[in-house]
Each structure stands twice: as C-alpha cells, then as structure tokens.
C-alpha cells in the first residue's frame, strides 16, 4: 500500500511540475468545424497544397476581389496583399507559413466579412481567434480584459516550456491548450535582432503556475492573423488574412 501511495504522490508532483493540472476553464481546447461542409474540406485541402507549393497564381485565383489584408491600414484587394507580403519574391515570403500556421489547427464557422446576408457560410482559422471560446475563462476572470496584444493560446498538446530562450535549456513544464499571457518586453529583450519574427515567446499561464519560454510555432497570439473563408454561390474564396488592428 505504501508503494502505491508513493507512486500516486510522485505522479501528482510530476503533473504539478509540468503544468498539466490547470483547470479546463483556463484552456481553449481544439475545435475544427471544417468537416461539416464537404466542399470546404476539398477547398482547404486545395489551399494547403497551394501554400505548400507557394503558388501565387493559384492563390490569387481563389481570393475575393476585395480580399482584406488590413482593416486599420485600409488594405484591400490582391495588389495590397501582394505588397504586404512582398510577393514579387514569392518563394521568400513568410505568408505561406503564416497561413498554414493559421489553418492547420482547425477553424470555426463565423459571420464572415463580406455580404453577410447573401453568403452561404463563412469560417475563420485558427479556432483560437474566435472570441466566443473565451467566455468560460472570462467568467473566472471578470476583471480581466483578454487584450489581443498580450494574450495567446497554446495550440499543441504537451508543448514544452523552457527555462530560457533556448530549446536546449532545461524544460520546466509542458502545456496543452492553455490560455497564455505573453510578456513581449521579455520576448523582445531576449531576441533584439528578431524584429517581430520571434522564435520563442516568454509566457505565463493565467493562474501563474507556469512561466517560461515556448516556441512560437506552438502558440497562437490573438494579435496575430486570422484567415477568413466565405462560400457564395457554392464557391469558397479567401476573403481576409488580417491581424487584430
């Protein structure tokens, strides 16, 4: 019996040290509604292929003529999209990886951007960009405004958290789908030459149980870009790839 109790206590210690005991209300679990529309499944598979192949012509062919790149910057249409992402040198553009990072976790249906009364459906990627998913956490933190510029979500299961801004440093925890508070001052200070192309972010969990460095590829920052797709007359198009601005 003693050995069983010892093993149980050891398991509790391990789970606590890895940040895996946080309550569900502090997490945004993955949601992907893509499969509810067979035409969307086909379109998303096509889009992923285009992004992987970095095929500008095929990408433009499935864009809405008023494709939104920035609301605040008043950037609409294919020309503004091309300018924003430096597609004159398409193979070197970061847009391909950013779009894949948005779409791979899955998406949720939404109101869309254009012609809300006439479109058949709209979906946004990633799921973590949907404010409706944060209602449970907001109920636990009524005085907290989940500022998009300082809030993120871990979009991986068992994502490692490191002691310092270095993947070879000590792993201090693992996180799965937790809502995160991003410390951009620490993030920028540790990567002064990165611009905004950070490889890692310094984060805290909402309950403060876990602090440390996590790979950028393992999170979605709410201030990051959201991909919108809309269906009209039976045809899907990309209608926006926008940051919170």
Image (cartoon, rainbow, N blue to C red):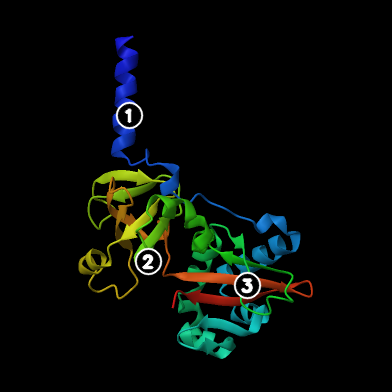
Q: Residue at x 65, y 58 (%)?
A: 34
> Is disc 1 surrounded by few (<14), some (14 to 19) or many (20+) residues within 10 Å?
few
Disc 1 versus disc 2: nearer the observer: 2
Q: Does 105 sit above or below residue 16?
A: below
Say if mark 3 contacts mark 2, CB within 8 Å: no
Q: Is residue 60 left or right of residue 194?
A: right
Distance Cα–Cα, label 1 vs label 2: 33 Å
Q: Is residue 114 left or right of residue 93?
A: right
Residue under label 3, please give it.
112
Q: Secondary structure at mark 1?
A: helix
Where is residue 105 drawn, in percent x and y?
53, 57
Q: Does 101 sit above or below residue 30?
A: below
Residue 147 is marked as 2
Distance Cα–Cα, label 3 vs label 2: 22 Å
Q: Secondary structure at mark 2?
A: loop
Residue 12 is marked as 1
Q: Nearer the viewer, residue 165 or 141?
A: 141
Where is residue 120 drawn, in percent x and y?
74, 70
The first of marks 3 and 1 along the sequence is 1
The first of marks 1 and 2 along the sequence is 1
Q: Residue furthest top?
A: 1
Determine which quarter of the picture holds residue 8. top left
Q: Does 73 sit above or below residue 99?
A: below
Q: Nearer the viewer, residue 140 or 171?
A: 140
């Amino acid at each position: 019996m003693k050995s069983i109790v010892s093993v149980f206590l050891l398991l509790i210690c391990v789970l606590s040290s890895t940040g895996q005991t946080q309550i569900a209300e502090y997490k945004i679990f993955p949601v992907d509604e893509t499969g509810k529309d067979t035409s969307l499944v086909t379109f998303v598979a096509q889009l992923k292929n285009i992004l992987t192949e970095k095929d500008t012509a095929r990408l433009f062919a499935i864009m809405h003529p008023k494709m939104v790149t920035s609301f605040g910057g008043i950037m609409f249409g294919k020309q503004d999209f091309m300018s924003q992402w430096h597609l004159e040198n398409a193979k070197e553009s970061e847009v391909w990886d950013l779009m894949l990072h948005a779409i791979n976790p899955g998406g949720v249906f939404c109101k869309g951007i254009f012609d809300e009364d006439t479109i058949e459906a709209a979906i946004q990627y990633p799921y973590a960009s949907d404010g409706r998913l944060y209602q449970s956490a907001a109920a636990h933190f009524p005085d907290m405004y989940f500022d998009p510029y300082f809030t993120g979500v871990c979009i991986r299961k068992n994502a490692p958290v490191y002691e310092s801004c270095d993947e070879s440093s000590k792993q201090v925890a693992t996180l799965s789908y937790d809502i995160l508070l991003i410390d951009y001052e620490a993030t920028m200070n540790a990567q002064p030459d990165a611009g905004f192309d950070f490889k890692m972010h310094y984060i805290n969990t909402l309950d403060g149980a876990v602090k440390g460095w996590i790979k950028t590829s393992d999170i979605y920052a709410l201030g990051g870009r959201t991909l919108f797709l809309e269906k009209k007359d039976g045809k899907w198009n990309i209608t926006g790839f926008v940051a919170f601005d």
